[in-house]
Structure formats: C-alpha cells, structure tokens
Image (tube, rainbow, N blue to C red):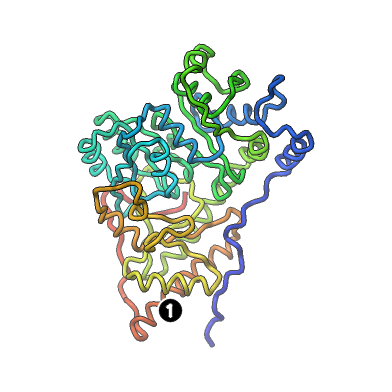
C-alpha cells in the first residue's frame, strides 16, 4: 500500500508574533498619539534613539540611522558615499529589485556583475567590470543570506578603489571568518520588513563609522534640525557643517516601529539558532533527491538563513513550471528565479530594463534558470521541515516520471566545487 500524498497545511508567510513588551509599548504610544520619533517641545519618547544605539552595538558600527525601509537605507548609503547622478555602481546579479532600485533612486547607473554556482558575486568579473566602468562604489547584496568570499571581494575593492556598501537585508547575524557581515564596507543597510530577522512590517537601518557621512545621513533621513535627539550621532560640529546643504528626504522610522523592534533584538540569538536548525534539516532532506543541487558555501561563511534555496539543474523551463504547480497542489509555495516575469519576491537582471545592462549575464541567468526558494518561518517544527523536503522530492519525482514516460533522470546533478568550496551545511 503506497504512502498518502504529502500535503502541507502550514502558511509559510506567517511571522512570529511581536513580543509582548513591544505590543505593550506600541499600545502606550498609540494611546498617547505620539508616533513621530521627534518631539518639538523636547524628546517625548526615546524609542527610535535607543533602538539606533542598540542596533549599532549589535552590529559593531559607530553610528546607526533608523529609516523606513531597507531600500531607503541603501539609497542613503549611496548618497552619503558620494555617489553622484550618472555614476556607475556595481551590483551582483542575484538580488531583489529594490537593490538596483536603490541605485536608480540615487540617479546612478547599475553595472551588474556575474554570479556563480555559489549564488554570490564573481570576484574576477567584479574586477573586470570595475576597471571597464570606472565605478567607485560596489553595492554588495548578501542575497538570501549567501556570503561571498569576503577576502577576495575586499581585495578587489581595495585594489580598484571601491567604496563597499553591504546589503544585509538577509544577513543580520551572519559572519565571515568570525567577522560580522555589515562591518566590511563603508556602510551597510539592514531591513526590518516582515519576512526578515526583525519585523516592524517595514523599517530599515543604515550603519556606518564615518562621522561626516553619519551627519549627512541623519539630516537626509529627515530630522527637522532635531538631530540632537539622536543618541547615535557624531559630534555636533559635523551636523552643523552639513545642515545647510543636506536635503531632507523624509525617510524616518516611526516611534511605533522602533517600539515594536526593540524587544526583538533580545530574541535575535534564539531566532538565528532556530533558523539555522531549520535550514540544516530541510537541506538534509533535499539531499536525498537525485534532482536537487544545493548551493555551494564558501569555507569561512557563517550565514543567518531565513529561507532555503536549491537548484534543479536537469529541469528545463517547462519542467520547472510543472514542478511549481505540483508543489503548490500539495500546499507548498516554491519561488523560482527563472520565470519570464518577476513574481512576488523573485527577480533576475533581465527583469530590470531600467538597469540598461550591456552584458547578457549568461552565467547568472543560467544559474537563476533552475534556482528555487522556499520561505521558512522561524516557528517551523522539525516535522514540518521534513514534510517540506518530502514534498519537494516527491514533486520532482512526479514531474520527472511524467515527462519521461515513467522513468526520470537517474544520475544526481553535481554542483561545481573547488578546493575552497564546501557544500551547504547548517549554520
């Protein structure tokens, strides 16, 4: 007698509840009506200012400016790094649209760099495009928490004179050889959108060390000359010097978002540990499929995953579509980066017509053509992890059997490896 058809009944978009302390403080603020982070008659509350201090200490940077989204944090980073209209800005090809969008928002020009089977930036293509384009900035996206060889990336950046801005929307708590991701470059941006490590619905953080740049970031964010209410700020002389020439872009985080986020900082170690367990357990289940290739991980990378990625190298576009439909029929939504049009939280460089890339990015699109993604809420149980992996395996088998008349591919696809690579494991 065959096993019953595996069905997932869990909503994978369901976040963990806001801690009770955050709810209580949010209610207190709503009762007062004082949801703006600044107080014209003095600081009415300190939620945003304290959050900035705490977040800067968490990451290990001198200054933090809390803003309304991760995309706004990246835009501000580009502005205070001196990126001017028309300037080329390098960015890796595996990321989401808000990242090249931040470059366009700054009136600059994205120059897209190839990725490899490891899903991260190719240092040699980075070097070549830095030299060819004359770019002086790299917006490095740690997309889905995958960490590049930061030694190689920073060697290229140093030799080519690149200011590195890290997109850490998916990498809060990640490390490279023990060093915190978000501390390698000139600045870094983080996100507090619902599906990230911290959840305010929307929100973001810009972290950096340079005093003059931090002063401009505070003024750009929209402090209305109330910057003395920032606890994480440079000396007042830097703020005074920039005050007459720095535009207000109104990108502030609200006091309400900050109140929701502060208690979550204490929850972060537990969340990171559980997400690593979830990723490792699902990855172990996926390895049992002959059709699945897990991403290569660089030695030294210690990611902080909130989702699982895998490739199906032997499936063409039609088979991928059939697989998505089969998995969906079993209650499992799988995202695919190879679709002709960007859908939901996936995209590829060919979708970014505004980027006007002169490079066909064949390697990047070959990788993305078979790349899948599954969201993994931190509250998943072990049995739910096992069920997700089982559904993927069975859905792939079903599609392969249907397309081969009863016999699918028999050889397991092999990921490209090298001496400095290892296959994906738990954090």
Query: Mark 1, residues whose alpha carbon is within 10 Å: few (<14), some, or many (≥20)?
Result: some
Which residue is rendered at x = 49% and y = 71% of the image? 327
- Residue 363, placed above or below residue 315: above
Which residue is rendered at x = 58% and y = 69% of the image? 8
Which residue is rendered at x = 46% and y = 27% of the image? 208
Report if residue 91 is visible in the image.
Answer: yes
Which residue sits furthest right? 31
Towards the viewer: 124 or 335: 335
Q: Position of residue 403 (x, y in %)?
A: 35, 81
Q: Position of residue 254 (x, y in %)?
A: 63, 35
So how many labels did they put on this image? Answer: 1
Q: Position of residue 144 (x, y in %)?
A: 44, 50
Q: Which residue is mark 1?
A: 398
Kindly indicate the quadrant of the structure image that contains residue 397: bottom left
Q: Position of residue 100 (x, y in %)?
A: 39, 44
Q: Quadrant of the N terminus?
A: bottom right
- Residue 316, placed above or below residue 302: below
Towards the viewer: 284 or 135: 135
Towards the viewer: 91 or 38: 38
Kindly indicate the quadrant of the structure image that contains residue 347: bottom left
Report if residue 173 is visible in the image.
Answer: no
Which secondary structure lies at badge 1?
A: helix
Which residue is rendered at x = 45% and y = 37% of the image? 74
Kindly indicate the quadrant of the structure image that contains residue 343: bottom left
270 left or right, relative to 110: right
């Amino acid at each position: 007698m065959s096993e019953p058809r595996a069905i997932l009944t869990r909503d994978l978009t369901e976040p963990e509840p806001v801690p009770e302390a955050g709810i209580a403080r949010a209610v207190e603020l709503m009762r007062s009506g004082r949801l703006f982070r600044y107080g014209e008659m003095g600081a009415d509350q300190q939620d945003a200012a304290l959050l900035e201090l705490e977040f800067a200490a968490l990451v290990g940077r001198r200054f933090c400016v809390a803003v309304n989204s991760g995309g706004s944090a990246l835009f501000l980073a580009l502005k205070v790094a001196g990126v001017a209209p028309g300037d080329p800005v390098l960015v890796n090809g595996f990321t989401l649209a808000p990242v090249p969008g931040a470059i366009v928002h700054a009136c600059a020009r994205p120059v897209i760099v190839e990725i490899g089977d490891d899903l991260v930036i190719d240092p040699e293509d980075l070097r070549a495009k830095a030299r060819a384009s004359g770019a002086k900035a790299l917006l490095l996206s740690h997309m889905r928490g995958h960490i590049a060889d930061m030694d190689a990336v920073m060697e290229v950046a140093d030799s080519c004179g690149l200011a590195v801005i890290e997109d850490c929307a998916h990498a809060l708590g990640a490390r490279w050889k023990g060093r915190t991701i978000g501390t390698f470059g000139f600045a870094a941006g983080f996100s507090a959108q619902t599906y990230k490590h911290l959840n305010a619905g929307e929100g973001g953080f810009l972290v950096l060390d340079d005093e003059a740049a931090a002063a401009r970031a505070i003024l750009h964010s929209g402090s209305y000359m109330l910057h003395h209410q920032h606890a994480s700020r440079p000396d007042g002389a830097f703020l005074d010097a920039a005050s007459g020439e720095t535009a207000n872009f109104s990108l502030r985080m609200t006091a309400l978002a900050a109140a929701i986020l502060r208690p979550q900082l204490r929850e972060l170690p537990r969340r990171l540990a559980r997400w690593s367990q979830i990723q490792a357990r699902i990855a172990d289940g996926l390895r049992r499929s002959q059709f699945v290739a897990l991403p290569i991980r660089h030695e030294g990378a210690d990611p902080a995953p909130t989702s699982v990625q895998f490739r199906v190298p032997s499936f063409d576009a039609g088979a991928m579509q059939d697989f998505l439909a089969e998995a969906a029929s079993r209650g499992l939504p799988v995202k695919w980066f190879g679709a002709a049009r960007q859908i939901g939280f996936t995209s590829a460089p060919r979708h970014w017509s505004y980027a006007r890339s002169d490079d066909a990015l064949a390697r990047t699109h070959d990788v993305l053509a078979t790349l899948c993604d599954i969201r993994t809420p931190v509250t998943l149980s072990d049995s739910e992890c096992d069920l997700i992996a089982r559904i993927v395996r069975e859905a792939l088998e079903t599609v392969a059997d249907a397309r081969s008349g009863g016999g699918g591919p028999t050889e397991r696809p092999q990921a490209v490896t090298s001496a400095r690579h290892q296959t994906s494991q738990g954090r």
